[in-house]
Amino acid sequence: MAFVDYYKVLGIDKTASEKDIKNAYRKLARKYHPDLNPNDQEANKKFQEINEANEVLTDPEKRKKYDQYGENWQHAEAYEQARQQQQQGRAYSGYSGGGSDGGFNFESFNNEGGDFSDFFQSMFGGAGGGGGRRQARYRGQDFNAELQLSLQDAATTHKQTLTVNGKNIRITIPAGVENGQTIKIASHGGAGVNNGPNGDLYITFIITDDPRFKRSGNDLLATQKIDLYTAVLGGEITVDTLTGQVKLNVKPETQNGTKIKLKGKGFPVYKKEGEFGDLYLTYDVQIPTNLTEQQKELFKQLANS
Amino acid sequence: MATDNLTEANEFCSYHQVEYTFVQTLADAGLVEITVLNQTSYIPGHQLPELERMIRLHQDLDINVAGIEAITHLLQRLHNTQQELLTLKNRLRIYE
């Protein structure tokens, strides 16, 4: 567990006054507040650090303890043990005053505080938060998660079960989600503090590349190889689409690089059932190789005709 | 009109320890909407997360309504830009 220099976190001197601390906190909080930095994990982490530093340094009792033990805060526990043993000794000899077990009384720190560092929890007896100063209700933390889908999966409305903080959540993923798109699952984030509402869960979809199709909005793009003879003379070919194979007529004298559109064979439109984009195929005419002498002769005749 | 999806403004204010006038000022600035039914003010459910965000900015960072208004517009622009960037990135994947 690393020592946290709260003065350094706030960028202030050890002799800083309460006003200096408040000013330093406000300045940094305005920079890193999660509401001003949506979806920025780094800013969120930084805000938790400055919040924790402010929590300790603005409370005279906590600041005193922090200043007293500083980097040697680990020794505080040994000191506490010795002190408790001393008190127990006194109790056995008839001492009966006080309900506290001696040492530092941080009873007001009774919030659930998953956002505080190990250092803070070790030094100040666990959870942090607003202390006894303000019993405000806080909305729980928003959670962010990433979900990887194949292009094929993203094209079909389906259900998936996710495990978030030990809880299973069954969600329906609508067909047509975009790569990088985020959906909100209300109230599935962190628990609120002091009966505050739960945070939300944000799921960002990462759609992996598909070897056959590229996606452009609701349209799909693909390259279709055709042999030279079909390109020249025309014919019927079978092509892949997301939903299976279809037969296609190739016009005679089709040029290399020709684009054709297969209407409605593209990607499903997000939250519009029955609507689809188009599939665009680009013909890649394959020149025959390993020709026999006879075939070469025929091509020569064709060239000279 | 059903009030199932509406929160009484006074109840909301006492829950979040803010003056009703603060919410009213945000409404006057067009940042939130308040629905009045039978002379009682309500806040629509879909407005709550946004309104709570504004209250946090006010309480945590001492930002006044004018500041909140500016931040809200900038965050909206940031959101739009991020969406545009995402669309462009997805388009670029075609050429990768």
Image (tube, rainbow, N blue to C red):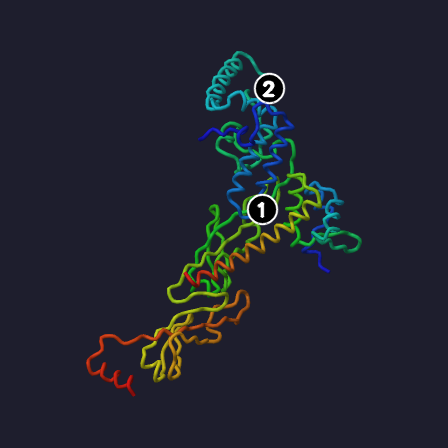
Q: Position of residue A67 (x, y in %)?
A: 54, 22
Q: Position of residue A257 (x, y in %)?
A: 40, 74
Tell me, yes or no, whether dots 1 and 2 are on the same chain.
yes
Q: Amino acid at mark 2?
A: Gly
Give the answer, above or below, for where A42 lies relative to A61: below
Q: Nearer the viewer, residue A131 or A93?
A: A131
Q: Is residue B19 left or right of residue A195?
A: right
Q: Position of residue A145 (x, y in %)?
A: 48, 50
The reply to whether residue A101 is visible in this rendering is: no
Residue situated furthest left in the rendering: A293
Element at label 1? loop
Element at label 2? loop
Q: Mark 1 sits on what residue?
A: A198
Q: Mark 2 sits on what residue?
A: A98
Q: Position of residue A158 (x, y in %)?
A: 47, 62
Distance from the alpha carbon under mark 1 to that under mark 2: 38 Å
**Which chain does tag 2 point to?**
A
Q: Is residue A221 left or right of residue A231?
A: right
Residue situated furthest front in the rendering: A304
